[in-house]
Amino acid sequence: MLYELLYSFHNYWTPLNVFRYITFRTTLASLTSLILALIIAPKIIRTLKKISMTQQIRSDGPKTHLAKAGTPTMGGIIIVLAIMISLLMWGNFRTVYTWVASIALLGFGTVGFIDDYLKAVKRNPGGLRAWYKFGAQVAIAFAIGMFLYVNPHDPYNTVLSVPFFKKWLFDLGFFYIPFSVFVIVGSSNAVNLTDGIDGLAIGLVAIAALANVALVYVSGHALFARYLQVLYLPGIGELTVFCGAMAGAALGFLWFNSYPAEVFMGDVGSLALGGALGTVAVIAKNEIVLAIVGGIFVIETISVVMQVMSFKLTGKRIFKMAPLHHHFELKGWQEPKVIVRFWIVGIILALFSLSTLKLR
């Protein structure tokens, strides 16, 4: 890794000692992934257009979306590449948690890539069969949960921490594995459901990733964790670099995905980012906090569940259309208004999630 190479010369040139600090490398990772996304995006977008990797638009949705037909999809490749290259430069792969988060990103991204490929190239509207897609997600999450369950370096590997209460720790035992699967798979699909209008999901991912930079850094810092009375988890501080890279890549992609979008991230991006956020939350014991910082993702998912249940039980729909952002579009809100207002709520929820560090 580049940072290790540079740091190895710190005895000869003292300023290189700065690379030992996670905060410095997180800043570098954020800037690197941001710049990489801005640089590689135009070429990848042109390539996606050339090979006809375009998004299929639902005819039963807001009519304004029909104009988006022909917009290239699978732009999530840009995000994943930017994150991984940045991590290879500034991340510490001697820490097992960096590997776990990277495997989650690449694993869920691969599932999304196959789904996008079938939709865009094979012109299969359904993409990857639902059970295959869900089964692959569960398998990846189960492998992660099992590893964390037997991880000897984590003294709290089966513990559920409740925010706002410093002594509310519940040992889930073996049930920690299915719980972690639920969190990771749920997070992955929640981001996927939210990715329905230009810039909405990726903007919220950037907000959540930035909040996680603070949450993870505190949990991995012995002095801060003791002062704020949160669980001290040795080694997870390196996930700060991962979250920083995710935030930078998300902002870089947003440059091209903002309204009107030049590219959509597709399932390869949404499933990967959601799975990564869920994995970070499980590692850092922030599973419940994830529901706060990613509150919009949760609300969007609940709106879909409510819509389906209501229609099956009563034959009536609660919303004009689910997920919730489409409901507001059909009520007459312009797409940019929906996006910005959801971002504002996302920022408020992210700030509230940070309050869990102090209010205990």
Image (cartoon, helix red, strand yellow):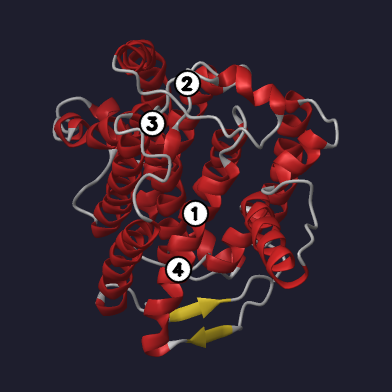
Q: Are marks 1 and 3 in contact (CB under 8 Å)?
A: no
Q: Secondary structure at mark 1?
A: helix
What is the x, y in percent for residue 60? 66, 37
Lower sequence index among marks 4 and 2: 4
Amino acid type of the residue that numbered disc 3 sits on in the rendered structure: Ile
**Residue 232 marker:** 4
Residue 14 placement, left or right of 66: left
Lower sequence index among marks 1 and 2: 1
**Residue 189 marker:** 1
From this view, report whether residue 258 is shown above or below residue 267. above
Give the residue drawn at x 38%, y 50%: 239
What is the x, y in percent for residue 161? 55, 76
Gap between marks 1 and 2 measured at Cα? 20 Å
Amino acid type of the residue that numbered disc 1 sits on in the rendered structure: Asn
Task: Pick whichever, 238 or 205, lies toward us.
Answer: 205
**Residue located beneath label 3 in the image:** 79
Gap between marks 4 and 2 measured at Cα? 40 Å
Task: Pick whichever, 303 or 225, lies toward us.
Answer: 303
Q: Are marks 1 and 4 in contact (CB under 8 Å)?
A: no
Lower sequence index among marks 1 and 4: 1
| Res. 297 in view | yes
| Res. 221 in view | no
The label nearer to you, 1 versus 4, is 1
Give the residue drawn at x 41%, y 80%: 176
